[in-house]
Image (spheres, rainbow, N blue to C red):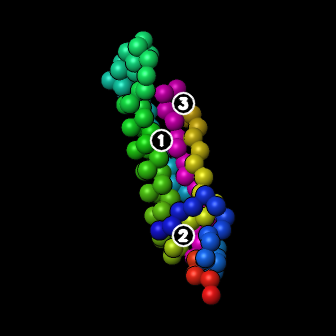
Amino acid sequence: MLVTTTETVTGFRVVRVLGLVRGNTVRTRNLGQDFLAGLRNIVGGEVTQYTAMLSQSREQALDRMRAEALALGANAIIAMRLTTSTVMAGAAEILAYGTAVILAPEE
């Protein structure tokens, strides 16, 4: 499924707009990651444990958004955005959202 941040796709036209689709996940830190992050804070550098956790979270949110679009019969999602918010101390939500559409090649 094509997922794009743009509102149009070169060479295609929107045949039908199916509506808003979204996928989200809420993740919390864990004690082991916090300990390693604390050590990294002393010496500096990337906190790879958090980088991996956030990457996995984004992919899960995107997968859930795609699944919702597929259930509507979409073949693309346009105007996709990602956002994050703090739910509580140590927990964050990642939300992927966009517009589910059916695209057809331009003639």
- Whole-angstrom CA distance, mark 1 to mark 2, is 25 Å
Picture residue at 58% right of the left edge, 82% below the top: 105
Up the image or down, 65 lies above or below 36; here it is below
- For the C terminus, the quadrant is bottom right
Judged by depth in the image, the label closer to the viewer, 1 or 2, is 2
The numbered dot on residue 88 is 3
Q: Give amino acid for label 2.
A: Ala
Q: Which residue is mark 1?
A: 26
Mark 3 or mark 2: which comes first in sequence? 2
Camera-side residue: 91 or 48?
48
Q: Which residue is mark 2?
A: 76
- Residue extending farthest to the right is 7
- Residue 47 visible, this angle: yes
Picture residue at 51% right of the left edge, 54% below the top: 23
Mark 3 element type: strand
The crowd level at tag 1 (other Cα within 10 Å; few <14, some 14-19, many 20+) is some
Camera-side residue: 93 or 53?
53
x, y (%) of residue 57?
A: 44, 44
> Which SS does the magenta portion mostly show?
strand
x, y (%) of residue 19?
A: 63, 68
Instruction: Evaluate if marks 3 and 2 touch, with contact meaning CB atoms under 8 Å apart.
Output: no
Mark 2 element type: strand
Which residues are drawn in magenta?
A: 88-102
